[in-house]
Amino acid sequence: MSDQKSIYLFYGADNFSLTRKVNFWIKEFEKKHSGDINIDTIEAKTLEPKAFGTNLQAMPFLAEKRLVIVKDFLDKGSTDNQKTIAKIIENTPDFCVLVFTENKTPDKRLTLYKKLSKIAKVEEFREPSPQETTTWITKEVQEKGGQIGFAEANFLSAHVGPNLWQLSNEIEKLVQASKSEPDGKITKQLIESLVSASISSSIFKLTDAIAAKNRKGSLNIFKKLIDSGEGTMMVFYMIVRHFRILIQSKYLTDQGQSPDSIARTLKQHPFVAKTSSQQSRNFSPETLKEIYRQLLEIDKKFKTGGIKVTVEDQSEFLLEIERFIINLSR
């Protein structure tokens, strides 16, 4: 048996690229091996070791190979079943291509993972970096027949984040819309008008409104964030994170570092680093420290029961954040 050629483990946070690769394999396999009759996809919850072992040894029907795909078994399969499967896959026949796919990074202490790391080809699909996301956007737009400049691709990357599922859908929409543009290109204005901003992008706008002392605008942006379905706690901690980045950007900017240097130091998207550097100029170091102190005070009250929050009622927490925004916007 040639294990490295027949057994695979695909895992990682970039579920889009992982899924795209598996779907490509399925299509190519169907072309070469008599359609989908020799393809089995098994979910973790339905995998029963004895039946799986029998299935693995089943000869392909009117073809040379069979493709067996097992989904999320390292994440959801029981420890005992995983140990059994680890033994079964040692006898995977040459005619069977066995692929394990995981949407999460598996626990490397698991018996099955240890076995796969020895006998399988393991490929991690990690979340793309900001630069990789921008490059991916440019390539994806071109493949769909559209045009986009580097600055616009960078802006779209920062606007949405590394969610390739959403980016793929947004690119489809933008390419179609750009056909009616004068030069046929995707512009920043088109992105802003058609693409839903990520929570990070919205918080940049919230910070701009706060710096401009625009109380009404600040509260409207905050309300839209909450109404969009983002959890109150998630929005709050993203605000905390953003002001922490602003404090760091302020310090590094005052030290004379460029936005590119700041991006590398803080491990942030270049667009985020540039915008943070610009935003930090609207606040003195003392003001940023005071804002951060107030945010930590809210966090402390929440964790010690000073703010009462339940799944059904988060009104006290919302009111506390609104007060914080109002005070900053005065």
Image (cartoon, grey):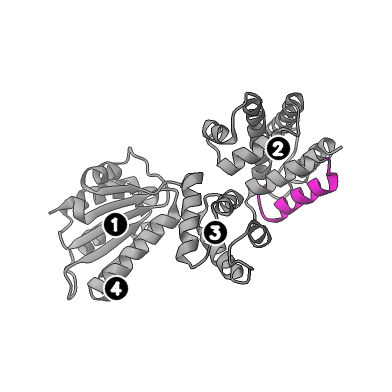
Of callouts 1 and 4, the N-terminal one: 4
CA distance separating discs 3 and 4: 38 Å
Circle 3 sits in a helix, a strand or a loop, which is it? loop
Which amino acid type is shown beneath numbered disc 3? Answer: Ile
Q: Secondary structure at mark 2?
A: helix
At 28% from the left edge and 45% from the top edge, which residue is drawn? 112
Q: Secondary structure at mark 1?
A: strand
> Which stretch appears magenta?
213-231
Task: Tell me how far mark 1 sits from mark 2, CA to CA.
Answer: 47 Å
Residues 10 and 275: in front is 275
Q: What's the magenta bit mostly, secondary-structure-wise?
A: helix
- For label 3, the residue is 148
* Residue at image coords 58%, 54%: 152
The amino acid marked with disc number 2 is Gln
Q: Is residue 320 visible?
A: no
**Vertical relation: 85 (above or below) 291:** below
Name the spot of residue 44 as percent of width and height, x first: 37, 56
Q: Earlier in the sequence, mark 2 or mark 4?
A: 4
What's the residue at 32%, 69% (across, down)? Answer: 27
Q: How many marks?
A: 4
* Place of residue 71 in the rendered image (x, y in percent of width and height, measured from the top left): 36, 57
**Which of label 1 and label 2 is nearer to you?**
2
- Image position, residue 105 (x, y; %): 40, 44
Between disc 3 and disc 4, the foreground one is: 3
Observer-nearest of 290 and 81: 290
Q: What is the quadrant of residue 258 in the picture?
A: top right
Q: Is residue 63 above or below residue 326?
A: below
Per the image, is 228 magenta?
yes
> Could you tell me which quadrant the N terminus lies in?
bottom left
Image point 50% across, 58% down: which residue?
165
Give the residue at the far right of this rendering. Answer: 330
Q: Earlier in the sequence, mark 3 or mark 4?
A: 4
